[in-house]
Image (cartoon, grey):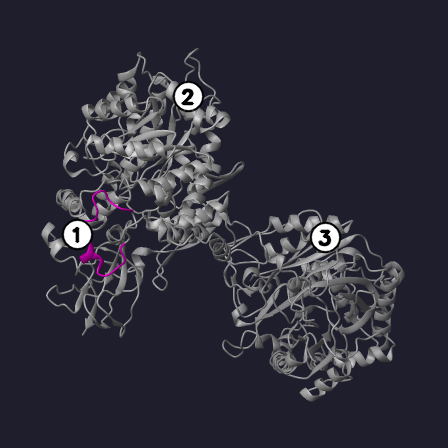
Amino acid sequence: MADTADPPTASPPQQPPHNKNETWGTAHPDGETHASANTVHQRLRANSSIMQLKKILVANRGEIPIRIFRTAHELSLQTVAVFSYEDRLSMHRQKADEAYVIGKKGQYTPVQAYLAGDEIIKIAKEHDCSLIHPGYGFLSENYEFAKKVEEAGLIWVGPSPDTINALGDKVSARKLAMKCDVPCVPGTPGPVAKFEEVKSFTDEHGFPIIIKAAFGGGGRGMRVVWKQEELKDNFERATSEAKSAFGNGTVFVERFLYRPKHIEVQLLGDNHGNVVHLYERDCSVQRRHQKVVELAPAKDLPQETRDKILNDAVKLAKSVNYRNAGTAEFLVDQENRYYFIEINPRIQVEHTITEEITGIDIVAAQIQIAAGASLQQLGLTQDRISTRGFAIQCRITTEDPSQAFKPDTGKIEVYRSAGGNGVRLDGGNGFAGAIITPHYDSMLVKCTCHGSTYEIARRKMLRALVEFRIRGVKTNIPFLASLLTHPTFIDSECWTTFIDDTPELFTLIGSQNRAQKLLAYLGDLAVNGSQIKGQIGESKFQGDILMPTLLDPQTDKPLDVSTPCKTGWRNILVSEGPAAFAKAIRKNKGCLIMDTTWRDAHQSLLATRMRTVDLCNIALHTSHALSNAFALENWGGATFDVAMRFLYEDPWDRLRKMRKLVPNIPFQMLLRGANGVAYSSLPDNAIYHFCDQAKKNGMDIFRVFDALNDVEQLEVGVKAVLKAGGVCEGTNPKKKYNLEYYLNLADKIVKMGVHIIAIKDMAGVLKPRAATLLVGHIREKYPDLPIHVHTHDSAGTGVASMVACAQAGADAVDAATDSMSGMTSQPSIGAIMASLEGGDLDPGLDAHNLRQIDHYWAQVRLLYSPFEAGLTGPDPEVYEHEIPGGQLTNLLFQAAQQGLGSQWAQTKKAYEQANDLLGDIVKVTPTSKVVGDLAQFMVSNNLTYQDTIDKADQLDFPSSVLEFFEGLMGQPYGGFPEPLRTKALRGRRKMDKRPGLYLEPMDFDGIRTKLKEQFGGCSETDVSSYAMYPKVFEDYKKFTQKFGDLSVLPTKYFLNRPQIGEEFNVELEKGKVLILKLLAVGPLSEQTGQREVFYEMNGEVRQVTVDDSKAAVENKSRPKADVGDSSQVGAPMSGVVVEVRVKDGTEVSKGDPIAVLSAMKMEMVISAPHSGKIGSLGVKEGDSVDGQDLVCKIVK
């Protein structure tokens, strides 16, 4: 077994003989005992009885030299390290008194340097070293090196060269064991080099067998073969691997034992034929024959078996006059029969656990024995050696268990180790700033824990693993935690292939690495500024937001808002169900208010960019101030995808948090019928699944609508809500159709079984007189059905219209807090309250507390000022262009993003024309988006109304327009416009029925499997998010894998660069707060285009490396497509290339997709205008392009 790891801190060294006349070697007692000693080493050396040995060189790297140096210093020795050029920054070089590079730069490979025995001996001689300790691995079992060391007049800290030669060869060791009557596994009598010899053995002894390298260990050159067909290939691979690793490809073969334990015995021998054991270790937990976790002593080994193994180990060592430290290794089968494997003539990685249970410093014993001490002089007689408790060692490595333990490389950004009672660490290159290279073994540190019982040691180890914080490279700590908590490990019943046989060990719960991921985002923010789409500049207000003080209306004393209010309309819904809730609402005399501030208000004014933290900060106050509200509109619609797409938040997490803080007020969401919250129809089962999850996670009222008033589409959503147990509010979107049309539509909606009927005036075109007429007729026809009205205040008539609705019989109307109301938002809640106050229609809310809540929102709106659309007042022009309030702000943003900001007037006019081209459709999401996309497309390409019709069969329309024409959004009232539809589709399918009838059911099991494989796990809400927006969800998950959960970050620091020296707090979870301060932003590296950013986190300096986007972006202007040259294909608008579907030389036919372009939420396919071969392809994925930039040429 080759050893690869880091040992622990040394125990106190064995004391030299108490009799001052007892010395060893060639002692010179008067050597350096003068009183004028002026260094620590000289003072220590003055009291040392081996002071004539001044220096020890350790011919190794990593943790084992550090381990040896510590003990050497305790023994008054000066220490010398050797290192390869690639290891020049390693820790072992710094821990030694002196350090010397092996050879010249480039003379040796990183590994060959530590195998350059002659060079190492030369260094030892040149610098007056007395001893050489080989550690483990590298030259530790090379008898020629040991021989040369002794021939050079140096002391070799290890067994004699002859012993190494005899035992290093496993076949020779096996012969020795048989000679000493120690049981061995049946195997070949000697090393074999030919396949025929192996075949002869299997013919006699059968399978399974194990092939092992004869001159090495560590799992290299080792193969288990189960059947004849696998034999030849495994033999060839084993011999090839052995030759590569050890320079000798011979192997030996033996029977393979099923699920054995690996037990090894620690031995010490002196120069006088004395040998003792330091008891055994259980090293059964291995991966590919390399030890992972070790235990001492073996927990459940029968005493009789233990005694036999210990005695046989000592007998073997004595038979070869074994000197110094070594390990005899055995396998123990299921019947507790044991078999000798080999003797390792060196110190082992796992010697630390033996030191912990015996109190003996094995390295100190090694050095002193090498200097001539006997075991008796060291007090190491068998009768004085005993064990106390149990010790476990874990090897912490930079390997990724989820990727078959693939070694990870890179820079350690954070390194915080464990400690405390019973925890010992032996580290090498584990420190912040260390560069982990691919040249060497992946071990960072060995963690050894000691306890009075096995269970105490196990729990101590778990605690220690949790304490580690290692960032920048992946580690095996999650796997070790999984291993230590497995029942088989808890019972100490592991066997040598336990890891390979137990796939559930790889169900890992890794460290979230939240702090470092958060710093990565903050570092990027400090260097590049906010990358949130649509943000212009920084917040106007960046101070601390003042929280309001609410008063008890009865006593005028401050209300306690530390806990949620318990009274509200939701209590009826929870206790009695949707029908009883609707009945109670209808019975209520006043006109209730639904507050839209939490969804539609910020969607309409601030491009839907409101973050969860700012909603939750006011949630407890809201539960009290609006306890008599009909509902809070707070979810669904555009907030769903924007949360993931631009805010990097989980919309479901938002819903759950809000529900916990506001248990008393019903929540309402927007459901787009058969689209769910997507922009086109989905399979019916996706809608049912979504509604079920929404209800389970806290949603109450579902406002269901269809953008085209397609009753069949609407019915899918209604049925899904009713099945989920939610309150169903069937919606009648308001548009310029006649009264008869709306009343007929209301009849159809009521027949579906809805609990409430809603009038949804998306564009704000419902005037007071029309409101009275429509609501009055519905109230007359359905006296028992609650009516709920929604509008936008785009034209400035919203308050008057809502008052008219209330007076005509509406049970609830929508409004927004004053500072978030008006224009494209909803009318002012304060104004509606004042208009209805004191009469029968009084909403029953306290005006003072509403104003206090509004003070909060006034500050928050300034925090989100970078997303303001710049609207300054009402726009009665809405009666002409009919742009929905919620869309108008987003349309302004999109226009700016595409360079159309100066053409806003043309865009509004084009919106009217686009609506007419599409058949004067109902404009509600997603059909409003179709009209908006077509309008911007027309402006970008200078298309008139007639141009669009005439050139339809040549134009690459936005994807949303094509989806509308296909019928993916349902059937418009009056049918599709022809011939525009046919010309635009160019042979694509046409759906003349509800789209869900054409779509295959969503494969939820397949989605679950995909997400688990891709992201390590998934919840049912993840499945639903993916079903709605597959790519948006994947991008969101990838972003959070890189930057973590940013929903905990205060909005000020989400949108704005922190100031140098500014201290701020981030609460990761209850009771876990990061105190952060930006210290500095480093200079730009011209080689990498990166900057180092330095933060102080909880008083500790953290460093992150950030790509400077300004340095990385190449400012090159792209050639423009010549509109007169049909071979040139230009970008139809400004945007980002998200997909390229061709390459130079690709043959395409007319209409074939070339690339996909995206701008904000609008996507369009760039297709081939004619057949030919692609040439001069000038774009790739991720490229930004302007309108008419040359994409490629198509040669006919």
Residue for point 10% across, 65% down:
1124
- Helix, strand or loop at label 3? It is helix
Mark 1 Cα shell of 10 Å, populated few (<14), some (14-19), many (≥20): few
Q: Which residue is mark 1?
A: 978
- Helix, strand or loop at label 2? It is helix
For discs 3 and 2, the disc positioned in front in the rendered view: 2
Circle 3: residue type: Ile
Circle 2: residue type: Ala
Separation of disc 3 and disc 2 at Cα? 58 Å
Mark 2 Cα shell of 10 Å, populated few (<14), some (14-19), many (≥20): some
Separation of disc 2 and disc 1 at Cα? 48 Å
- The label shown at residue 584 is 2
Circle 1: residue type: Glu
Q: Is residue 988 magenta?
A: yes
Looking at the rendered image, the quarter that the C terminus falls into is bottom left
Tell me if residue 679 can be seen: yes
The magenta stretch is: 970-990
